[in-house]
Amino acid sequence: MRLLVLLALLGGLGYLFGLGNRPIPRPPGVLAPLPPVQEEIPQGERAPLERPPYRLEPVARFHLEARVLGKRVYRADRAADLAPVDLALGWGRMSDTRVLERIRLWQDHRFYFYAWSGEPPIPPEEIVRSSANMHLIPADAAVERGLRRVRRGHLVRLSGLLVNVQGPQGFHWRTSTVRHDTGAGACEIVWVERLEVR
C-alpha cells in the first residue's frame, strides 16, 4: 500500500513539473483574432463586490478569447490570496506561433516583459495593443482550479468584470481599461466569472 501511495505521489509530481507545465504546441496562424470586448458600467450601477478583506468596484464588463503567452502563480505577495494567478495573454498576431517564436516572453513581480533580437516580428505598438498581463481574481473555486491548470499555449475564453480593488493597510489596485498602455498600472484586473480552456 505504501508503495502505491509513493508511486501516485511521484506520478503527480512528475506531471506537475513535467507534462503539467509543458507548453501546448500550436500550428502557425492567428488563433484568437479578436481583441477583448469591454462594456463600461455606469458609475451609478457599480455595485461593489465583497471578498473580505477586499472590496472590489466593477468598472466594465469584460470578455476575452486569447492565447496564453505565460502564466505566473503568486503565493507570497500582498494580493496572492485575492489574485493567485497572472496570465499573459495574446490576441491578433500575438496569438500566431510564427510571431511568438521570434519574441522572448516572461513574467515577474506582476509584470509581463518581452524582447526580441534584430527587427521585431511585428511593430512594437501592435505587440502592446495585442497582448497584456492580467491579474485574475477567481469568482469561485472551480474558476480558480481552472486557472491553476492553464498552461502556456492554451486558448482561453474568459468573462467577468474589470475591477478596482481596495484592501487593508491602504492596499489599492486600479485596473487598466485600455489596451495601448504599458508599465505600472497597465495590467487588467479581472474578476473571472466564467473560464473555458482548450
Image (spheres, rainbow, N blue to C red):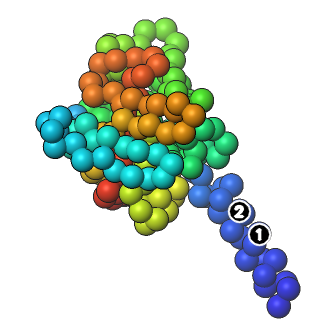
- Tag 1: amino acid: Leu
Is 132 in front, or is 78? 78
Residue 151: percent from the left, percent from the top? 50, 50
At numbered mark 1, what does the secondary structure look like: helix, strand or loop? helix
Q: Is residue 10 above or below residue 143?
A: below
Q: Could you tell me which secondary element the residue under label 2 belongs to? A: helix
Amino acid type shown at disc 2: Gly
Which residue of the protein is positioned furthest toward the bottom in this rendering? Answer: 1
Q: Residue furthest top?
A: 118
Instruction: Where is residue 61? Give x, y as percent.
Output: 21, 43
Residue at 25%, 37% in the rendered image? 59
Look at the image and tell me whether residue 144 can be seen. Answer: yes
Which residue matches tag 2? 14
* Residue 155 visible to the viewer: no
Task: Report the side of 46 relative to 69 (left or right).
Answer: left
The residue drawn where x is 39% and y is 52% is 50
Give coordinates of residue 108: x percent, y percent: 60, 30
Quadrant of residue 134 in the image?
Answer: top left
The residue indicated by pointer 1 is: 10
Q: Are marks 1 and 2 in contact (CB under 8 Å)?
A: yes
- Few, some or many residues within 10 Å of mark 2 (<14, 14–19, 20+): few
